[in-house]
Image (spheres, rainbow, N blue to C red):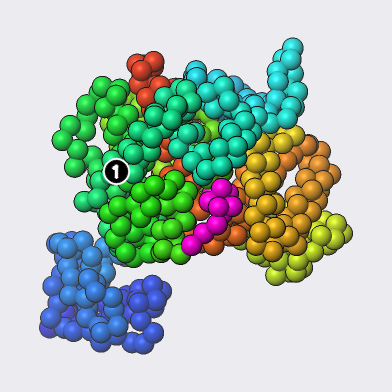
Amino acid sequence: MAVKNLLYQIFRHVCSSFLHEKHYTKGNPDFVKNFQSCNKFHASCYNVKTTVMPPGIGMMTCKEGNCICMELEKDDLRALYNRSAENNLIDPSLYARYRVKQGLRNENGTGVKVGLTRICDVVGYQMIHGHKHDTEGQLIYRGYTIDELVRRQKEAGTAMGYETTAFLLIFGHLPDEQELQAFRTTLLHNIHTDFIAAKYPTSNLLNAMQIEVLKMYAQDDNPDNDRLEDRMVKGLSILASLPLFVFSCHTSEKLTAYPLPDGSLAENILYMDRQGGSFTAEEANVLDILLMIHADHGGGNNSAFTDVVLTSTGTDIYSCISAAMGSLKGPKHGGAANKMAQMYDAILEETGITTDPAVLEDVCWRLLSKDFGDRSGLIYGIGHAIYTKSDPRARMIREACRQLAAEKGEEEAFAMMEALEQTACRVMKKAKGVQVCANVDFYSGFAYRMLGIEPELFVPLFAISRTAGWIAHHLENRQNNRKLIRPANIYVGERL
């Protein structure tokens, strides 16, 4: 009995500290004495019960995997890993010594050539006699510049530019009227409604999209069918189903069909986001352009390359698209529009709406010196790995924003955005000695805000749009590249 009482006191002390550290309770928990120890006979593994502890912790044992002992062991392992972190540290000078292209980038910042594609080209410079010369940026889909495709969309007077662009990327040519109608019908009706849910147990919508795409694999009677035409149909089913899933989750109302059967994807998205609310033709036009410019960005961008790497294994298209979404979820790839919106809000709170160059320049210097915003030292929305003189996507969305701002009476806010763009580029030139331009994210968040679209939808909408490009790259690589992508690493660890 004395030993048991001693163990109880030890247990009470350990668990009290643990619970306080984990913020499970604000007071002193009441412990019960009907102990059960784990098979390791840890003193801290006796059961604990308290009304303020979350469900699943009280009265559990190690066998369930949720006892206090297991949590303590996790903390011990975290501390151990932190103490061992130097075992994974690689001397940065070794990359140059072994001529390893870190991030698959050359010394001049250009990307390492790892593949061929006929789908999309991203142009920001020319190599002349081994030297990089900056040029005006161009985004080319199957031979057509994005400027040309947006011009055609405006001339057509419809908000169906994304459907035309997606068809172009996947099939390799612009559709005629009959082909476009067949494609639109597929996107509106080739959907999986069984997997759509209004609620999902994850705080991240893009993570939920990944899981739901994988669930479509389980519903497919022949998911590993390797015929290209069947892979294409499966990809279109993913693209068709994702908007319904996203807005079912976002509005907490299950959607099993598109509400506007004669509308474009942009129009349906606005209708679902506003839960039946009206929208103007200009609003639909701006969202359509956003979808068009995000549809692809070459086979070397991180999510497309992720898609291509998985495709080289011969796996199914559901796995490839889900993995590409995982890449897009990373803040260095898909989350910059959110960061830009947050930075703009911080500047607006600090300065109010202003176009004063001195005020904006002061803010930019403070951003770079980590004295403002999120203190990352970054000016979000400025600079790009390829584009230097101009980002064609930013050009397109800037002009679309100009027109929408006039419609909504937001001219002063738009003028501030333009002034901030010019000032930030000028400050970056002084600070870094390089020419930079606004990238697509600079105006995307502003456009979404004017459309009334909430920040948590920025990246999911990006993913919906980019799915067309992912499908195209998946099919192209499955058709042409049957070799497994398998690069090499150089071992620089100990040899004992």
Q: Which residue is mark 1?
A: 189
Left or right of 389 on screen, residue 487:
left
Left or right of 378 on screen, residue 335:
left
Question: For residue 275, which quarter of the picture?
Answer: bottom left
In depth, the one of 231 and 185 nearer the eye is 185
Pinpoint residue 192: horizontal percent, then vertical percent: 25, 46
Q: Which residues are magenta?
A: 278-287
Question: For residue 24, which quarter of the picture?
Answer: bottom left
Pinpoint residue 418: horizontal percent, then vertical percent: 75, 52
Q: Residue furthest right?
A: 358
Asked whether residue 279 appears in the rendered view, the answer is yes
Q: Tell me the SS state at disc 1.
A: helix
Question: For residue 452, which quarter of the picture?
Answer: bottom right
Give the main secondary structure of the magenta stretch. helix
Q: Any magenta on residue 39?
A: no
Pinpoint residue 62: horizontal percent, then vertical percent: 18, 63
State the residue at coordinates (41%, 32%). Answer: 180
In depth, the one of 483 and 321 nearer the eye is 321
In depth, the one of 444 and 204 nearer the eye is 444
